[in-house]
Amino acid sequence: MQPYLIYMTAGSLEEAEKIGKALVGERLAACVNIIEHMRSFYWWEGTLQEDHEVVMIAKTTSPLVDSLVERVKSLHSYRVPCIVSVPISGGNPDFLEWIDEVTR
């Protein structure tokens, strides 16, 4: 299976923890890292916004990407949450195998 990193943001630590625990608990992700205190600037509804957000990085496999995206959207408070997938092209083979094993 092709491993993927899924980059996401949330509006609060509590929301990120809820999403992360759901993804790992449902085996849609092998692991979710949460990074607090990100500062974001972005356009929303015609206005330049500035916010503090929380970054989440999930590790999963290609067959689970679509299900993971839909699950995050169902749990997320944002109308248009940031959820992007990036294929992993290399790394520690043992770690990449672990991702595949725990998401089966």
Image (tube, rainbow, N blue to C red):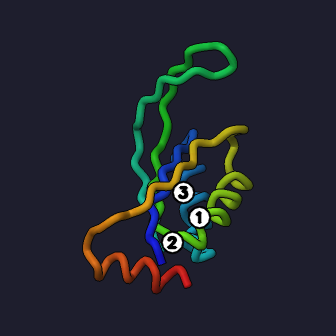
Residue at image point 62% right, 13% down: 47
Q: Is residue 90 left or right of residue 5?
A: left
Q: Secondary structure at mark 1?
A: helix
Q: Which residue is mark 2?
A: 61
Q: Quadrant of residue 23?
A: bottom right
Return the residue nearer the eye: 30 or 77. Answer: 30
Q: Is residue 35 left or right of residue 21?
A: left
Q: Which residue is mark 1?
A: 65
Q: Secondary structure at mark 3?
A: helix
Looking at the image, tell me whether mark 2 or mark 3 is earlier in sequence order. Answer: 3
Which mark is on residue 17? 3
Given the current orientation, which residue lies at the most extreme left position?
92
Residues tagged 1 and 3 counted as in contact (Cβ below 8 A): no
Residues tagged 1 and 2 counted as in contact (Cβ below 8 A): yes
Residue at image point 53% right, 49% down: 84
Q: Position of residue 70 (x, y in %)?
A: 70, 58
